[in-house]
Image (cartoon, helix red, strand yellow):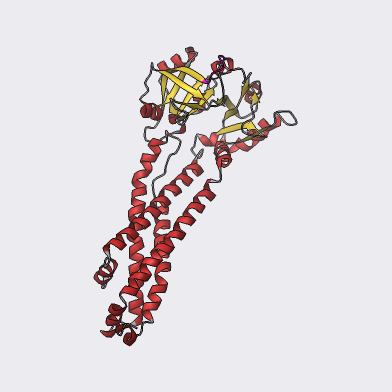
Amino acid sequence: MKYLHLIWAALFRRKTRTFLTLVSILTAFLLFGMLDGVRTSFANVGKSAAGAKRLQTGSKLSFIETLPQSLQARIAQVPGAEDVAYANWFGGAYQDPHNQVFSFAVSPNYIDIYPEVDVTPAERKAFDRTRTGVLVGDVLAAKYHWKVGDKLPLQSNIYPNRDGSKNWSFDIVGIIRATRPDDKQFLQGAVLMHWKYFDESNPYNRGRVGWYVTSVADAGQSDRVARAIDALSANSDHETKTMTEQAAMASWVKQMGDIGFIVVSIMGAVFFTLLLLTGNTMAQAVRERTSELAVLKTIGFSSRAVLALVLAESVLLVLLGGVIGLGLAALLGPIMSAGSGGMLNMPPVGAASWALGVGLMIAIGLLVGVLPAWRAMRLNIVDALAGR
């Protein structure tokens, strides 16, 4: 701290260059904070206490293959299985094909499998008796300004209805809310419709379901129950694969891509570019101050002291931009969660993320500063003052 004023003055000797470099560092660590949050969000899907007691059963061949509805009764007879619901992916879009809405056709008891969310008794009754009724998540309803009683037009990118078009019309009869208001859930960003109406209104489904969700009495028995469920369809034309909710969600995510690998690849490219940019900035800064560094040595600063000053300048530069970037990521995370319709529950930038981030900042600062600092340490006073 004794020479902080010297380091600070050297850092902002060229304010415009320093500012632009800080913006680059800030952007890199903003991306780091956001992408690490996305990775953690996907990794944590299904890890809730309720999620640990749910199993998802889909086709062993592919998640787009459907299963017979008759399998529900057989799964319900498996010892340890409490309740069994089923659903189909609808693939809806609102107003514009680009406004994709997470929409499912579900069995009447589907919402009961998810104690994390709830609807009022009156809205539940309205849903049960309204053939075209849908339940919409409160996050999604707020996004599009929907309310109970509205007509909801959706376009399915998969299923046409009986008239051959892909335009469907539903009635909003209830709102899905989290049982704990501060805990965002996936279904708060979804639309749930009646499976029976969906099945009867398109010519392709024909009594098939996309997947089953089974609640188990004891999470410790989940593996046994999963094996028993899969044994029901062994050696049939609809063999199944049953997994915990967390494993099933991870499998779905991998169908889209390896999120961890994608994040690491992006951040690797970003930090490599950052190393080049920041290294060039530090090299220029030290080269411009050759005579000043020689004066410092002349008045008594040792070679090691000059080395430490340049390294400290480099680390401070990265720390300033990095801390601001991670701070912005912490502020933007909740905004992204709200805007995702409940699909992404961005975790806060906690102690582990800050520790990793600060470690990266220090490591990058030392790495980009080591060569300029080494040259400054080996500077010959006579040659430097003579401009050679």
For the point 37% across and 48% down, the residue is 329
For the point 63% across and 38% down, the residue is 223
Residue 79 figure quarter: top right
Residue 235 position in % (x across, y down): 75, 31
- The reply to whether residue 178 is in sight is no
Range shown magenta? 162-166
In front here: 238 or 146?
A: 146
Q: Main secondary structure of the magenta part?
A: loop
Q: Is residue 52 above or below residue 375?
A: above
- The reply to whether residue 27 is in sight is yes
Q: Is residue 245 above or below residue 262?
A: above
Residue 48 position in % (x across, y down): 48, 38
Residue 195 position in % (x across, y down): 55, 19
For the point 31% across and 62% down, the residue is 17
Residue 43 position in % (x across, y down): 51, 44
Quadrant of the image containing the N terminus: bottom left
Q: Is residue 359 left or right of residue 55?
A: left
